[in-house]
Image (tube, rainbow, N blue to C red):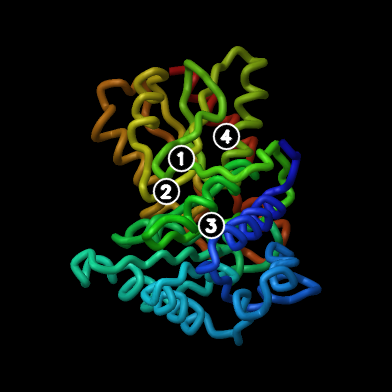
Amino acid sequence: MSRISIREAINKTLHEEMARDQSIILIGEDVASKHSGGVYGVTLGLSDKFGTERVIDTPITESAIIGAAGGAALTGLRPVAELMFIDFLGVCLDQLMNQIAKFRYMFGGNVTTPVTIRTMIGAGAGTGPQHSQILYPLLVSIPGIKVVAPSNAYDAKGLLAQAIRDDDPVVFCEHKAIYDEIAEVPDEEFVIPFGEARKVCEGKDITIVAFSRMVLFAEQAAKKLSSEGISVEVIDPRTLSPLDDKSIIESVEKTGKLLIVDEANPYCSMASEVSSVVAEKAFHALKAPIRKITSPHTPVPASPTLETFYVPSLSQIEEIVRELSNY
């Protein structure tokens, strides 16, 4: 076991998977840079080891990156494409939504499209409304795409390995504000199956379902609130599509109370989806109204001060958990 960051875990996994399988290629903007390894250094060293025929720098053209990845997958390669920021999804949405996501269906299951799209999500770096969004709800709504959002280095390694080996297209969402979060990670290769949530901490009074960076906030809140005698169970779905409904429902049936924390905007969010699932399948177990904490329905502000107010906070989580505990 080694204590490494999410950034290092992703880099290590890319090294391991590319060494294991010669059909894996990496394509994107600045991914082959020997100095930067992309905006946050995630692909550093890969071009030195595997060469520029497998680690391919592209012009600034997201439609070409995702389109080329889809075409490469149809020819037998397993491309890992980097969509630098998820905010650029609009530039290549046709390639992803109308092509890659539908190839297996349109060709009657005779082809697979093993494309992994790595992309950065989230606020917290002061990068403004065009580089800070959480747009995974858009992707979850598209049939044919699997969507992953790890919250720690262990999950990042296991889920990325699974994504690369999966025969369906996977969008792998990396929150830029938690790249340096460190955890113990096995040195050997391993995979984490999709559709299996992680129980971050056990509790009996209230369930918190949180996504990506918000898992860290929820875990901190649970530890603090335990000193007040409030027992909080935190569930990290890890994969948004497929979503592990069963683990969420089992937790709510035990606690009877649910808070969902999602950095995405409130409408048509994962918070809305989890609320719907629980209201439909575990309504009988609820002892209090379902509560949600999301970012407001506005663009992400560029001002660091305003951005702090925009993102759901630890204090908001603590406040609502205390309110729920009084039911």
- Of residue 312 and residue 24, the one placed in the foreground of this image is 24
Could you say which quadrant of the image residue 256 lies in?
top left
Q: Secondary structure at mark 1?
A: loop
Q: Earlier in the sequence, mark 4 or mark 2?
A: 2
User: Which residue sits at x=39%, y=54%?
Assistant: 267
Q: Are marks 4 and 1 in contact (CB under 8 Å)?
A: no
Q: Position of residue 298 (x, y in %)?
A: 51, 62
Q: Are marks 1 and 2 in contact (CB under 8 Å)?
A: yes
Q: Is residue 127 left or right of residue 295?
A: right
Q: Measure how far apart labels 4 and 2 are at the Cα level.
A: 21 Å
| Quadrant placement of the C terminus | top left
Q: Earlier in the sequence, mark 3 or mark 4?
A: 3
Residue to which mark 2 is pinned: 240
User: Which residue sits at x=31%, y=74%?
Assistant: 98
In the rendered structure, find residue 317 and report the number of the disc placed on it: 4
Q: Secondary structure at mark 4?
A: helix
Q: Secondary structure at mark 2?
A: strand
Residue to which mark 3 is pinned: 173
Q: Is residue 193 left or right of residue 60?
A: left
Q: Earlier in the sequence, mark 2 or mark 3?
A: 3
User: Which residue sits at x=53%, y=20%?
Assistant: 202
Residue to which mark 1 is pinned: 237
